Image (spheres, rainbow, N blue to C red):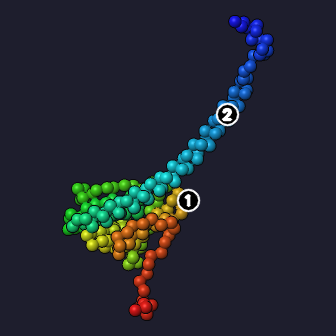
Amino acid sequence: MRTSKDRNRWFGSRVVGFTLAELLVVLAVISLLILLAQLHLFGLLRTNTFRAQVQELVSTMQMAASAAAESDRRYEVILDIPEQSYLLREITNPDLSEVLDEEIILQANLSSSCRLAYVEFDDRQYTNDSRAKFRTGHTGWAYGGKIVLLDEQGQPHSIVVNRLNRMVALEQGDVGLLEPKLKNELLF
């Protein structure tokens, strides 16, 4: 059996360890790495928050179109630009200007990382300071258009609502709407 004298002979009599200064430097480096990781993570979360909110709005529009296509019901997505919010409702009241509490299916607010800039309809109606309404029924959207949202850096993203094929799609940038052709521009 080996004794402590034998161990000292093999390893030397020097005690190995860290000084307080070395421990503080290591803790400072680890803290700095954790801080950098948190900053990176928060940046990703802000980006994902924008994407999540835009995707939720696109899903709401798609849900309204598909529910209306499968039934004889009419739905409306109301975008409130001053309040930075939107809601989905099933239209049950003949007075379209009044929204009843029992009609509301979904209601959501947008955060500061996802700002509703303006809405332009395909009949060239434009709003950036009031409510915009997209109505859909069994035959499709009453109007098409685009909803322009700004991310945290102010970059535009467009949700395009196509009334001809009921498609709702997210596009990068402020996309232009298709303009009708004049008679002399048509080939047939």
**Residue 117 in view in this figure:** no
Secondary structure state at the residue bearing disc 1: loop
- Which residue corresponds to the image point at 73% horizontal and 23% vertical from the top-left? 19
The amino acid pointed to by label 2 is Ala
Q: What residue does disc 1 label? A: 153
Of callouts 1 and 2, the N-terminal one: 2
Q: Of the residues tagged 1 and 2, which is closer to the observer?
A: 2
Q: Quadrant of residue 166?
A: bottom left
Q: Quadrant of residue 182?
A: bottom left
How many residues crowd around disc 1 within 10 Å: few (fewer than 14), some, or many (20 or more)? Answer: few
Q: CA distance from mark 1 to mark 2?
A: 32 Å
Q: Report x, y in % for residue 64.
A: 31, 63
**Residue 6 in view in this figure:** yes
Secondary structure state at the residue bearing disc 2: helix
Dot 1 and dot 2 residues touching (CB under 8 Å)? no
Q: Report x, y in % for residue 88.
A: 31, 60
Q: Quadrant of the C terminus?
A: bottom left
| Image mark for residue 182 | none
- Which residue corresponds to the image point at 47% horizontal and 67% vertical from the top-left? 171
| Image mark for residue 28 | 2
The amino acid pointed to by label 1 is Gln
* Left or right: 6, with 148 as reference point: right
Q: Report x, y in % for residue 41.
A: 55, 46
Q: Quadrant of the N terminus?
A: top right
- Which residue corresponds to the image point at 72% horizontal and 23% vertical from the top-left? 18
- Which residue corresponds to the image point at 47% horizontal and 52% vertical from the top-left? 49
